Every structure is written in C-alpha cells, then in structure tokens.
Image (cartoon, helix red, strand yellow):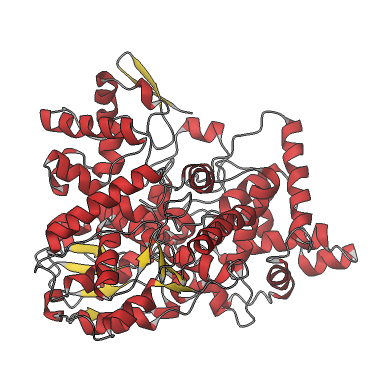
C-alpha cells in the first residue's frame, strides 16, 4: 500500500488515494487529502460537506447517496463540484476519509 | 513524426515472454483524433505515468497502465509456484469436470481460428490505440492458443510447433497475460464479426477465470469489494439492508415532492407480479432511476416488490466478468429470493450485465421463473394505453447508447427504440448501433476501476470510440453547452463510464452533454407528472 506524506503526516492510502484506515481520520488529514484533490483551502462550506459525510458514514458504514448529500447540506451538485473538482464520490468522500465507494456508483 | 515511431509494440507474439521494462506504449499522438473542441492533444487531460514505486512493487511491464496489480514475486521459488499453478489451472480450463460451462465454445475458439484477422478492425480498443499490436483481439487469444497446443494438446510436437507456433511460459508471460486479460471490455464485437464465431471475448474472460479460480488472483473491485462484499453485506456498494431502505425512503419522498405523485416503494411483498431487481449502484448514484420505476409500475397497475435480503436488492453479478463459482453463488441467491417471494417473474433494472447474467447465462438456475429486461417491460407499459404522455416535454436532442450485453448478447434492440421514437421527438441514432454498437469502454467492470492510472486508460483508449460516437451523433446540433443534449444509456455500468468520460473531457461545460437512463425520459413525458421533472442542472 502506498503512503502519502504531507507536512509531518504519513497516511496510508489505497491505489486511488483513499484512506486505508478511515477511523484514523482527523481534520489535519482532511487538509492533507484535500491537497491531492486540488483543494487548497477548506472553507466552512467544505467542512459542512465533510462533516455530513463523516456522520452518515458512522451510522451506515458507507457514503450517502449524492442527492441526499445535496439536500441535507443545501448545496447543488454543481456547487459540490465547484468545491471538490472530482465530484462528491471521488473528491468529497476522499477528503472526508471515507473508503472509496464500491459497486457501480 | 510518423505515428508508428511514437508507439512501441511487440513485433511477435513470442515477445510476450521476453523480459523488458515495458512491452508496449501508446502515445496520445497515436490515438485517432477526437472531434473539436477535443481535437488538440495538448489541451486534453494527460496520461499519468505510473510511479517508480508501482513499477517496482507490482507487475507492470505490459503497457502504460496497471489494473490488477499483482505483487512482484519475492523469489525464484515463488515465480515457479505461480507458473505451476497457472499450468494446473490451464489444464482444468480444458476438462469437462472443471469447466463444463464454457469448455465447448472455448475449445472451438482455440482450434478453429483461421488467423484471417477479420475481427481486428471491429475492436474499439485496438483502433483507439492506433492499432497497437498488444490490443489486437487475436494477439491475446494467440498466446492462450499456443499454450493450449503446447501443454494441453501437444500431439506430434515438431509438427505442432511448426503448425501452431511455440511459446515460452515464464513469469513475464504470466504477469503480462493477466494484465492483458484486463485490457478488453468483453464487448464481443470481434466475436460477432468472426465468420466462424471464434469468441475472443470468451477467451479473455476464461483467462481471468483461470487466474481467479485456480490462483486466487483477482481484480479487487470485482472480487473483494464486488462479489465477496455483495454476498457478505448484501450489495457490492456496501449497503446493508438498513442503508438501502433508508435510501429508498429518501427516494420515495424526493420523487413524491418532485412529481406530485405519491410514491411508496414495496419491500418483500409475497406473490407480486414483478420482483424488481436493480443494480444497487442506482440507489446511490442515480436515485431517479429506481424512483421512476416505482412511479411507472404503480401507474401501470402492476404489483411489484423489491427484496431486502442479502443480494436481493443488488442485481449485479460481477462473477460474469471473471469467475464461474462467484457467478453461480450470486445467481443461486437471486433465484432463491424470487422463489421464496413467489413472484411471477423477475424484471432486471437498467443494467446490462445483470440482464445477461440472469437472463441468459444462468438460465438453467432459474427453472420456472421467467426473467424480463426492463426494456421490454417499459415498452409494454408505454404502449399499453394506460398512461398519457406529452412527448414535447422531452424536446431536446437525445441519442441512445446500446449496452453490449442487452443488444449483442441478448438481442434486446427494438423496445428501447420504440419508446424513444415515440417519447423523444429529437431522438437520433448513433452509428453504428444496435447489435453493431460500440462499447462505452467501461465494459466488464472497467467503469468501476480507477486504481493507479487505469482511469486514463479506460477514458482515453477503451472509451475513446464511444465518446467520438456521442459527439458525432449531435454534430447537427448547436455544439455549445447552451443546447442540452441527453445520452440515454440504460445500464448502470455504462452510465458510470459515460459520466466519467464527460467529467474527464469537460463535455458538460463544453458541449452540453448529459446522460441518464430510459425510464427517466418516460416519466418526464407523463402528463400526470409535474412539468420539468428532468432537471439538467442537477444531472
């Protein structure tokens, strides 16, 4: 498994750059992962998305559906793409430390 | 610079066994040009190079990418063990007791290829790569064929070597052949064009099976996170039954609000006419699709249900792409669930490989339970006269992508077109289409793979032909994003690939390209549904 280094952090990620150990996630790691997604600054809006993903993941063990994410955070899909250029699944979920979504999604 | 000087390719089939850093390389200049505004190579996303770390740790000497990522063996002994296991698997592939499912077409494909190469021009991967030798559909087959004549059916060995050609089985061949079996989307366009029906797609799939069943070497998205997770948790998406019910509840509410028609999805209803089996990816990524099915079936007065049992709410069967045992395990689950619920039939949602797995490949498992694709059910409902439509609500350019498994594997070609000709006034075909269609480039599960730099490969090479076809289909329209265009792709896997293609090339912003399923267009045209159901901003 590749390791990804950022400042003092050393994070174990899979071949897609998603965390291997989602339970180790913290806000510093979110910043580190954001840097791999061409996201330089995490604004309050970013955090709103990230925190919602974390909460949902804790409850159900997977990422929420995209429309639910939009509805619950109040952001349109376009706004989510503006924040996370590779989109909700590949971008936002990665920053939130979720494992890579699986199946035909 | 001429094209051929940019690419690097083997000169002979036997080069597969000759160690080198990389057997083949495709330069972006080798690939056929895309129509404007995607015609300038420099402006397109680059092809990421594999890291030195990847090249060192996993088998990566085939081409510019890695899919399976088999760890490099640590010793000569380990290499030998793998080769021995490969040979054992090869023998099993050609015995009836170990491969009763596909032995016959496989042997026929081994023994009767006339090397006429009629099929090669039908391969979208070979064409997109600038005809790189390793992607020629017969290149891969020829490797297995030589191994077959050398180890399985040697006969008079001197004559054999002369007639069928020799090949050296070593670690280099083995590791490259594994990767090469994941450079074909199993679209089987080549099999269709073969004058005698030699099936290179089957050969590719059987190579994957050999690695999986005998050696435990698999692609992780199909196996670990795919069939294994599906049988353990309930779905390849990782959704357990609580999660899927929570999602469906949300979909029902959302659909009710947007359409003005109350929707309540059904779970575990015994004796229903239809067991609706979606690809579970729909619930997460394209929730309008199952939502529209719920609405449409209710409107048609059909009693239907979904199942909340393990694998009962996920119609995918990735075993189809790589392993008979996993295929059978999931098919048996689907059968048991349908039988227990005493449904009249199973309807497969808009998913190509699911339709093939349940409808064709597992036919013997489903004794007594009819299966139907969503395509014919939707057409029957649309033309039943029970529902009033206003086709002008779909007054935007629409084209149809044919999922290979629906058209070429099953012959389900016409129902979806009848619906579109009626409900989409600006419908136009791609060329070619129907059984002669081109794969989206995400076939055989590629759409769910993006490890290492495989995404670049599947979007630049295997998906190239489809992207060009889509652009060409709208060539008579205003090319700008002002005119919203809809690619109807009635298959979850194809939708994933088409979404990635559009994201990758910025096609939504540049050309107004959108995509979705068939049933969404049907519901969008229903008079009883609030106008403006389809919202291009949200797609």
Q: Residue at x 47, y 42 (%)?
A: B233
Residue B212, given in percent of the width and then of the height, sits at 64, 48
Residue B281, given in percent of the width and then of the height, sits at 36, 53
- B80 versus B522 height, above or below: above
Whether residue B132 is visible to the viewer of this picture, yes or no, is no
Q: Residue at x 60, y 52 (%)?
A: B326
Query: Residue B100: which quarter of the image?
Result: bottom right
- B500 versus B84 height, above or below: below
Residue closer to the observer: B333 or A76: B333
Q: Residue at x 72, y 40 (%)?
A: B82
Residue B201, given in percent of the width and then of the height, sits at 57, 66
Residue lying farthest to the top in this orientation: A8
Residue B496, given in percent of the width and then of the height, sits at 34, 56
Q: Is residue B34 left or right of residue B214?
A: left
- B456 versus B102 height, above or below: above
Whether residue B460 is visible to the viewer of this picture, yes or no, is yes
């Amino acid at each position: 498994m590749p390791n990804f280094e950022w400042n003092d952090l050393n994070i174990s990620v899979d071949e897609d750059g998603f965390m291997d150990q989602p339970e180790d996630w913290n806000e510093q790691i979110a910043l580190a992962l954001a840097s791999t997604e061409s996201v330089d600054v995490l604004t309050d809006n970013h955090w709103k998305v990230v925190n919602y993903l974390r909460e949902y993941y804790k409850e159900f063990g997977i990422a929420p559906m995209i429309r639910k994410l939009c509805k619950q955070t109040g952001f349109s899909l376009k706004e989510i793409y503006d924040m996370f250029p590779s989109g909700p699944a590949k971008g936002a979920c990665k920053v939130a430390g979720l494992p890579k979504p699986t199946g035909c999604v | 610079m001429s094209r051929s000087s940019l690419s690097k390719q083997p000169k002979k089939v036997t080069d597969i066994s000759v160690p080198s850093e990389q057997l083949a390389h495709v330069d972006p200049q080798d690939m056929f040009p895309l129509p404007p505004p995607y015609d300038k190579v420099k402006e397109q996303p680059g092809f990421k190079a594999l890291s030195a770390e990847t090249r060192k740790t996993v088998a990566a000497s085939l081409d510019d990418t890695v899919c399976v990522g088999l760890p490099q063996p640590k010793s000569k002994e380990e290499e030998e063990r793998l080769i021995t296991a490969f040979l054992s698997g090869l023998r099993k592939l050609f015995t009836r007791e170990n491969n009763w499912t596909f032995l016959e077409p496989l042997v026929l494909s081994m023994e009767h290829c006339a090397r006429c190469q009629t099929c090669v021009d039908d391969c979208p991967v070979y064409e997109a790569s600038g005809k790189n030798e390793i992607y020629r559909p017969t290149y891969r087959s020829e490797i297995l064929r030589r191994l077959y004549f050398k180890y399985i059916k040697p006969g008079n060995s001197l004559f054999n070597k002369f007639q069928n050609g020799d090949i050296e089985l070593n670690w280099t061949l083995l590791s490259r052949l594994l990767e090469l079996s994941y450079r074909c989307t199993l679209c089987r366009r080549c099999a269709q064009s073969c004058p005698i029906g030699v099936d290179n797609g089957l050969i590719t799939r059987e190579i994957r099976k050999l690695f999986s069943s005998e050696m435990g070497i698999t692609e992780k998205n199909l196996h670990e996170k795919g069939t294994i997770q599906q049988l353990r948790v309930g779905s390849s998406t990782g959704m357990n039954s609580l999660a899927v019910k929570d999602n469906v509840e949300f979909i029902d509410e959302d659909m009710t609000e947007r359409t003005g028609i109350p929707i309540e999805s059904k779970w575990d209803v015994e004796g229903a006419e239809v067991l609706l089996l979606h690809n579970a990816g729909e619930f997460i990524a394209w929730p309008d699709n199952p939502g529209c099915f719920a609405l449409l079936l209710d409107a048609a007065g059909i009693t239907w249900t979904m199942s909340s049992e393990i694998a009962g709410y996920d119609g995918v069967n990735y075993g189809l792409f790589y392993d008979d045992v996993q295929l059978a395990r999931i098919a048996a689950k689907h059968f048991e669930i349908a039988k227990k619920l005493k449904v009249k039939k199973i309807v497969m949602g808009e998913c190509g490989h699911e339709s093939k797995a349940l409808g064709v490949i597992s036919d013997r498992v489903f004794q007594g339970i009819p299966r139907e694709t969503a395509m014919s059910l939707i057409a029957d409902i649309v033309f039943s006269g029970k529902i009033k439509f206003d086709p002008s609500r779909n007054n935007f350019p629409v084209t149809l992508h044919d999922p290979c498994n629906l058209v070429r594997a099953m012959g389900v070609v016409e129902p979806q077109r009848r619906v579109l000709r009626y409900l989409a006034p600006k419908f136009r075909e791609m060329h070619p289409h129907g059984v002669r269609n081109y794969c989206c480039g995400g076939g055989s599960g590629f759409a769910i793979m993006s490890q290492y730099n495989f995404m670049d490969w599947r979007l630049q090479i295997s998906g190239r032909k489809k992207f060009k076809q889509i652009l060409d289909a709208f060539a008579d329209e205003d090319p700008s994003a002002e005119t919203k265009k809809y690619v109807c792709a009635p298959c979850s896997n194809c939708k994933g690939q088409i979404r990635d293609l559009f994201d990758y090339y910025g096609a939504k912003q540049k050309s107004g390209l959108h995509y979705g399923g068939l049933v969404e267009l049907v519901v969008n045209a229903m008079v009883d549904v609030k106008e403006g159901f389809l919202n291009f901003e949200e797609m």
